[in-house]
Amino acid sequence: MEGAKAAAGPAAGGQLESALLHIMQQHHHQSLRQRQQTERAKKDALRSAARVAGHLVEAVDGGVQELFVNEKRIELEARALLGTIARYRKQSDQWLAASNAVNSVLKEIGDFENWMKIMDFDCKSINAAIRNIHRS
């Protein structure tokens, strides 16, 4: 029996060693696969992060560019508006001067009309005085 045990011992030890070696190889292969998957996932995550960062930069740059264009457009419109305001100010000053001139002319016409009434009254008074002198 001891011989059977001795014969079974080395064979069983070889199987155990072979099984352990097989388990170690499987573990090593699984570790390699896991490491490769991790590396792939890491690269994919980096690519995705770079893509997201690129989109964010494009979005921000696009907004900044749009703001810059709008600012330039507003500046041009403000300059045009200032020119229009200057033209309207000049025109309103001209209208005010014309209106003052018309008012002066109307006042002079009123003064002339009043002078004419006074002259008419004086002429009638003189005419009446001359008639009275002439009748007497």
Image: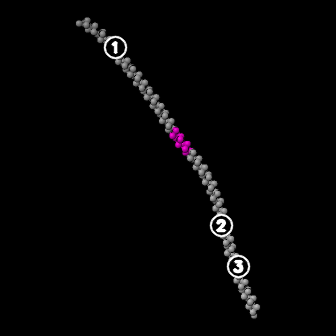
The residue that disc 1 covers is: 18
**Does dot 2 land on a helix, a strand or a loop?**
helix
Residue at image x 51%, y 36%? 54
Indicate which disc, 3 or 2, sits on the residue closer to the N terminus: 2
Q: Which residues are magenta?
A: 58-68
The residue that disc 2 covers is: 99
The residue that disc 3 covers is: 116
Quarter the C terminus occupies:
bottom right
Residue at image x 67%, y 72%? 106
Q: Residues within 10 Å of mark 3 (few under 14, many from 20)?
A: few
> In the rendered structure, which amino acid carries the disc numbered 2?
Ser
Q: Is residue 79 left or right of residue 55?
A: right
**Does dot 3 land on a helix, a strand or a loop?**
helix
User: x, y percentage for residue 121?
Assistant: 70, 83
**Does dot 1 land on a helix, a strand or a loop?**
helix
In the image, which is nearer the foreground, mark 1 or mark 3? Answer: 3
Q: Residues within 10 Å of mark 1 (few under 14, many from 20)?
A: few
User: x, y percentage for residue 28?
Assistant: 39, 20
Quadrant for residue 128, please give it: bottom right
Indicate which disc, 1 or 2, sits on the residue closer to the N terminus: 1
Residue at image x 70%, y 79%? 116
Quarter the N terminus occupies:
top left
State how far apart marks 1 and 3 are (Cα). 143 Å
